[in-house]
Amino acid sequence: MSKLVLRNLHRRFGSFAAVDGVDLALQEGEFVSLLGPSGCGKTTTLRMIAGFIPPSDGTIEMDGEILSSPQAVMPPERRRMSMIFQSYAIWPNMTVAENVSFGLKLRKLPAEEVRRRTGEILEVVQMSHLAGRYPAELSGGQQQRVALARAIVVKPSVLLLDEPLSNLDANLREEMRFEIRRLHDEFRITTVYVTHDQAEAMVTSDRIAVMNAGKIEQVDDPFSLYNRPRTRFVAGFIGRTNFLEARLVGDRLGLDGFELPAAMVQSAAGPGERVLLSVRPQSITLHHAPPPDDGDRVSVPAQVVECAYLGEHWDYVVVPQGSGTRLRVTAAPAQRHQPGEAVWVRFDPAQIVAIS
């Protein structure tokens, strides 16, 4: 049995469908991110899971019990869930230890158990040495650790996180992604994480549900989602890609000014039909001379038209000879090419995907 199940979940505000038929099942101990742009319905979905908003249609179930339906909604305090907000929501008049122990005291646990569990979780989040400080004396990352400790210490059945790292600077955000994943691996709490940041979702998640206009476009593990996107939206939202329109003619895919063997791409298109290809920038390589033909990869002559050095890599724009197609290409720092330079572009068939 799945731990948490959303069945045909809808939420309408007047005539606007914020969530439009979401189906999602989480297994015990799974970490699933709801990823998408602003307004896609991910936070509304999370708030329905928490019990703050009733669904217009559909149900939310946990351990086989219906928590939410249009007829009845179990209140948040009875759901055995913890939620971490974007603003941390820790009490400024309480010390770190008092913030963390608050939920345990509400459950009327013995004082010795409260002290023990508070001390244990502060050790886990590396905040024991700051137990007596107040939130105003802490950095953003330290406040986030307090919020995590307070949510985990009560041993919830489900942990909900609503863009918890959005207020942190870039370096701290990167550090906390790994911290959240480390804590999940240690406690194995079923987790739903809302974010618009694909890197956060890729680092933390077992699976990612990409949302767009109130619907889930694809649910998959990070590797499959990136390398085998099923829709144009997913391919464009997860990382960068080149979209190439092709037409199937015999055993060739005809593009603007050049061709690729149809065997390079798995596609259900019939003769004469159009195919949309997603080609990641790092799956294309640039060469000063025609690379040797190994029978697997295809090379075409091209010209470099733009370049930008980004430290960890070069970002090139190249145009195949006789074509108006602009291709984004990522290359290692040592691979230097100048605008106007003639190059050969080589495609890796393993990373070309036909999408719907």
Image (tube, grey):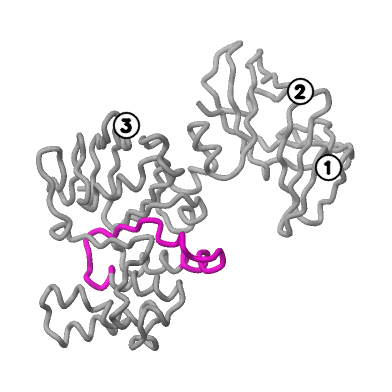
Q: Is disc 3 in contact with disc 1, using a CB cutoff of under 8 Å? A: no
Gap in Å between the C-alphas at discs 3 and 1? 51 Å
* Neighbour tally class for label 2: few under 14, some 14-19, many 20 plus, Cα within 10 Å: some
Residue 1 image position (x, y, % from top left)? 20, 48
Location of mark 2 (residue)? 258
Location of mark 1 (residue)? 287
What amino acid is found at the position of numbered circle 2 in the picture?
Phe
Residue 333 image position (x, y, % from top left)? 78, 56
Location of mark 3 (residue)? 16
Which of 203/85 is in front?
85
Q: Can residue 186 be seen in this view?
A: yes
Quick one: SS at disc 1?
Answer: strand
What amino acid is found at the position of numbered circle 3 in the picture?
Phe
How many labels were placed on the picture? Answer: 3
Q: In which quarter of the image is residue 255?
A: top right
What amino acid is found at the position of numbered circle 1 in the picture?
His
* Neighbour tally class for label 3: few under 14, some 14-19, many 20 plus, Cα within 10 Å: few
- Tell me if residue 171 is in the magenta stretch: yes
Q: Is residue 19 shown left or right of residue 229?
A: left
Q: Is residue 17 shown left or right of residue 312?
A: left
Quick one: SS at disc 2?
Answer: loop
Q: Can residue 2 be seen in this view?
A: no
The part of the chain drawn in magenta is 151-178
Which of 10/252 is in front?
10
Q: Which residue is drawn at 35% across and 82% down?
A: 134
Q: Is residue 132 above or below residue 186?
A: below
Q: Which residue is drawn at 89% across and 37% down?
A: 342
